[in-house]
Image: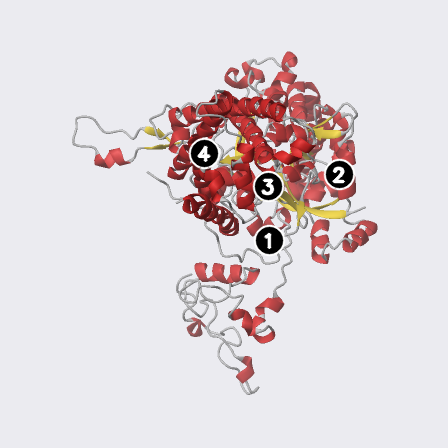
Amino acid sequence: MKVMAQMAMVMNLDKCIGCHTCSVTCKQAWTNRTGTEYVWFNNVETRPGQGYPRRYEDQEEWKGGWTLNKRGRLSLKAGGRWRKLATIFSNPKLPSIKDYYEPWTYDYATLTDAPAQEHTPVARPKSLISGKDMKISWSSNWDDNLGGSAATEKHDPMLAKIADKVKFEFEQTFMFYLPRICEHCLNPSCAASCPSGAIYKRAEDGIVLVDQDRCRGWRMCVSGCPYKKVYFNHKTGKAEKCTFCFPRIEVGLPTVCAETCVGRLRYIGLVLYDADRVLEAASVPDEHDLYEAQRSVLMDPHDPEVVRAAERDGIPRDWIDAAQRSPIHALINVFKVALPLHPEYRTMPMVWYIPPLSPVIDVVRETGEDAEDTGNLFAAIDALRIPVEYLAELFTAGDTVPVDGVLKKLAAMRSYMRDINLGRDPDASIPAAVGMSEEEMYDMYRLLAIAKYDERYVIPPAHAEQAHSLEEIATECSVSEYGGGNPEIFGEGSGSQTPLAVENFRMLQDRQTSDTIASPNDKAARVNLLNWDGKGAPPGMFPPKDADQHHGRGDEQ
Amino acid sequence: MDTFLWVIVPYLCLATFVVGHFWRYRYDKFGWTTRSSQLYENRLLRIGSPLFHFGMLGVVGGHIVGLLVPQSWTDTMGISHEAYHVVAVTGGLLAGIMAVVGMVILIYRRRTVGPVFSATTVMDKVMYAFLAVVILLGMWNTIAGSIMTIGGEYNYREGVSVWYRSFLAFNPDASLMANAPWGFQLHALVAFGLFALWPFTRLVHVFSAPLGYLTRPYIVYRSRDDQLGSHRPRRGWDRISQ
């Protein structure tokens, strides 16, 4: 048993309103550069739909992820090491820019530069690839909100699998949004596909990163990732991918996509997993067993034996505490309402989803029945096979049993909580019907519906203790200033480097957000207790008793 | 003049080659890439690139054997001069034709496909010119020199190869090159020019041939750097040329 920690995410799809705020803020933070115009580390897809890049889920075409070979052993679907090297001069399965979309900008200059003319000048779209005029015909969310319509139905690879049962009558259409980031898999096929070994999984928090100095631009990761979440920067010639905002995570802040999520549907936390069992779990023969296998690799952080093993394997105590409070562990293994995206790719993804109940509820509501009655909802989940089977294709390799279970839990939670909210007696038979206690049901409600910030994000800061180097001047040989110091002697870059730490981050934040230069506004004065001889009370030591001492405080509030 | 051409220039180029690579690796790891343009265009690349690269692998292999294995070794192994010649010329022709055809396709692609052409730097163009001249001169030497024997028969294994080994042993014999046919002389000179340019072009990717991939474990684990993000930010951008 080797315990490792993994930073993971769960998204509650019921809450996603498809506003793309996550995509936009992520893009602003990470990929608003030349060469990454078409790159969306985070994108939101309308399902049913093609996704981005188009039809990326069709692994018979793209050959991403892992598969079991004839001997039942796990192997890369696109072929092993020799095959990779033999095709290195021309990657056979690289999506072209057309499969993503041709990025563009507008010729804004015309609007101001155009000579006086009869008609208003227009800003024409210009391709950012060729620089020429172009006709915009596709983008990363061109089929936004077109879920379930005839325009997209035939292009959705997941829908194709259940096509014989799906009748796309207008009344029966359903639609939901699927925000996607890199899955930071336990068994990442992008890393396994990288000939240079530039893609690595961080031992501390499991974040999968591309070493930009080692990447040589062979592009095998792009093909290897079944989620198509590694992108090729066509300007630098290097691969780039979602970093799980590791600079933020390291100081205990949630990712940009999570922080800015309007629906507050993202959860971030640690899970502990047994690294020795990953391969075994990824190799179970029946695809329907993959969800359970993957769940079983994640360990119970409350189990004293797991805690001992974790401490033995060097996981810091506060990280174990964080793993115990982790919303991810709760959603995956306690309430069992989160499901992995496409476990059949066998990469063991670490961004999980709570499937949406909304399509079911919408249908029930349209029939005029009570959409929050347990009986109605349970019956509807059973009757509405199409959404359930479609969700199963996404989250459980087509096995409807777990999806059914999750939807029933969510339905039960609604009914149970409605009784409480309306002041009725809570009905204990409702949680019991889905195998939960009343207390568990309330806890789940609290996590899913109340979703407090510090319960959604339980992120222990990285351990980079720098006490020693901060005392460099006192305890280290100052010769380093001559030999090992910074070559720049003058100007801003001179001196040794300031380590980036939580303190700096907070200091900077305070400095950027406070209105005054030195003393904080909300305190009347600073008290230096070192100078206080114990006689009387210096001003500012206690809160002011009357209003005229309130100066400087009430003014702006 | 002979000393300048066949001693000074080659050593200058060799020094640039070695020091240049060291410098580039030390200061520009971020720029060390194939700079693939497959994202822009795949139809021509799919044919041209493997043709060119596998052809070049053959050509390089042929040069290693031809230049580094002394004739006396093959003689003692009992390989006759004629047999060696037939194998070398056949292999060389095959690899050479692959490389030339691939190169023509790739240059055509680079010139005609808009996005690929606009991603081509000045250095790329200079490098292409040198590379093309070297390859064409090499083909000329094979076809005109070895097959059609224009300008008399010349056994490079007794001339150019011996000089090259003496060059690598830091004991160069310039006269051997001075007496070689002009085709070989030019081929060698332009090739040395290419070597001098090498570290400053995308050709550096040759030295990143990922052979380690065959033996390393599939999943690489690495610990976070001890210093959290306190490296001086290296240049993560490139000038937009427009």
Q: Which residue is mark 1?
A: A250
| Relative height, residue A315 to residue B179 (above, below) | below
x and y, in percent, of residue A216 in the image: 55, 39
Q: Which residue is mark 2?
A: A278
- CB within 8 Å, label 4 to label 3: no
Three-letter amino acid code at the position of disc 4: His
Measured Cα–Cα span from mark 1 to mark 2: 25 Å
Q: Nearer the viewer, residue A455 or A295?
A: A295
Q: Chain of mark 3?
A: A
Check the residue under mark 1 and report the chain it is in. A
The figure's colour scheme reads: secondary structure
Residues packed near mark 4 inside 10 Å, few (<14), some (14 to 19) or many (20 plus): many
- Is the residue under label 4 in contact with that under label 2 (CB below 8 Å)? no
Between disc 2 and disc 3, the foreground one is 2
Name the disc covering residue B187, or none. 4
- Spatial CA span between label 4 and label 3: 63 Å
Identify residue type, mark 1: Glu
Q: Given the image, what chain letter belongs to the residue carrying mark 2?
A: A
Say left or right for A557 vs A345.
Answer: left
Image location (x, y in percent) of residue A87: 60, 27
Considering the numbered disc 2 on the image, is that residue within a helix, a strand or a loop? helix
Q: Nearer the viewer, mark 3 or mark 1?
A: 1
